[in-house]
Image (spheres, rainbow, N blue to C red):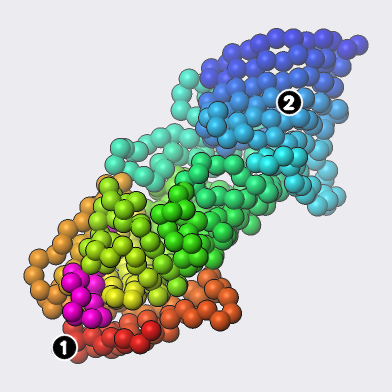
Amino acid sequence: MPFPVKGQLDAGTTYVAIEGVIADAADISGIDVNLRIEGQTLANLYPFLLLPLPLPASPPYRLQGHLVLKGNRYTMEDLAGNWLERHHWQGRLRRPGAPPPADRGPPQQAAQAGRPGAADWRGNEAKRRQACGVPVRNQQPAGCEVEGEGVNHVLPAGRFDGSRLQKIDAEVDFVATKLVVPEALPLESLKASLRLRDARLKVDPLDFGFAGGTIASKVALDARTPTIQSDVQIDLQRVRIDKLAPDPSTIAKGAGRVGGTLRLKGAGNSIADAAAKADGRISATVVNGRISNLLDAASGLNGGKVLALLAGGDKDIVIRCGGVNFDIAGGRGKSTLFVVDTEQTQVLGTGGFDLEHERFDITIAPKPKDFGLLSLRTPVRLHGSFKEPDFEVVKGPLVARVGAALGLAAVNPLAALLPLIETGPGEETNCGTVQRQVTDAVRQAGTPKATNMKVDKKP
């Protein structure tokens, strides 16, 4: 017979309040209750509360809903909650009974949420493969031990327990048609599709609407061995410069687009460990950009001061085209392309970074197109840690500056980055001109007089 239940439970950092009916207290074959849960991380819910799947570590959370269990089918209706009391969401969570693998149908598709800023979360999370240990209490979040993370590091060092991915199969589709986030973060929407089978996780796509463009991503993790293998692909597509700043007055409207790519393969049970020995490349490009009043907005930042130095103090910077590429091997990145072409100046650069120690050292040298301009003609060195970058003006004449090293920036053609921009018909990108200039610099770097660089002054 039905058994009424009402109670509260504190278990370590997790608080649970429940009120409703259990169909059979001995068998727990049916549950119909209102549930409220608060805690420091979702990871501590497994295997707590009969939850049949491990969950990742999360920020402090609060959620409530109407939990119904019929047979082996869980449904959480009227689900609502928030992260850190700031990010609110609502929807529905359902775990159907897992059929045999051959009989599995397609996953449930996500739909638009009932109100802006929310998402309807529907997934087909399959079977629990084997038993798991007890939750961690009054310690670091489960599956997220922190090692070696200090005040001078920015890459997360929290360690993930890969054995959790060996305990379940899962299929989850997630769509958020609108994201309500802090104004400084121009995220607009989210679409994700997750597939986990036999300890191999793929998230494809993992796409964000971002600043009028798209962050299109694919992530693959292989946890069949104690050290997780990772493969990350990210494309930054058609991002609008004017939407990158929270205050529209700081950057001119219609001020060009940015594109980029990131390809990294690594091994490690934290982001920091995987990046430390990763291989791949990072590329970025901008076309037809116009940045206005940015120097005033960034006057308190080293980046703003560097822009002021390179632009000769101009308030408006018209960027005809620019591109950078870093090849990464063993966690160390080395520039193979670094050029930014403005109306007044062409900026060339060289240098690299170290993902393991989170440090970088890059030298950039402006080359004024009109030598009558009062523009800086000596290089600027950017260096330091990722968290505390610094810069300095390099001493000595520009002829002795980084010399052939700047010219040796081999051209990974800018044309390969152009599909990420898609500026539209009739819009001149000027990337061809920039590429020819850099090609000339590379060719001249092979001769003793490598500093006599040709400049095409045509727009």
**Residue occupying the point 46% across, 65% down:** 255
Specify whether residue 147 is in view.
yes
Amino acid of disc 1: Lys
Q: Which residue is mark 2?
A: 65
Q: Which residue is mark 1?
A: 449
**Residue occupying the point 50% across, 65% down:** 254
**Residue occupying the point 27% across, 47% down:** 300
Amino acid of disc 2: Gly
Quarter of the figure that contains the N terminus: top right
The secondary structure type at the circle numbered 1 is: loop
Q: Is residue 367 magenta?
A: yes
Quarter of the figure that contains the C terminus: bottom left
Percent x, y of residue 45? 62, 27
Of residues 213 and 325, the one nearer the viewer is: 213
Q: Which residues are magenta?
A: 360-376
Percent x, y of residue 201? 61, 51
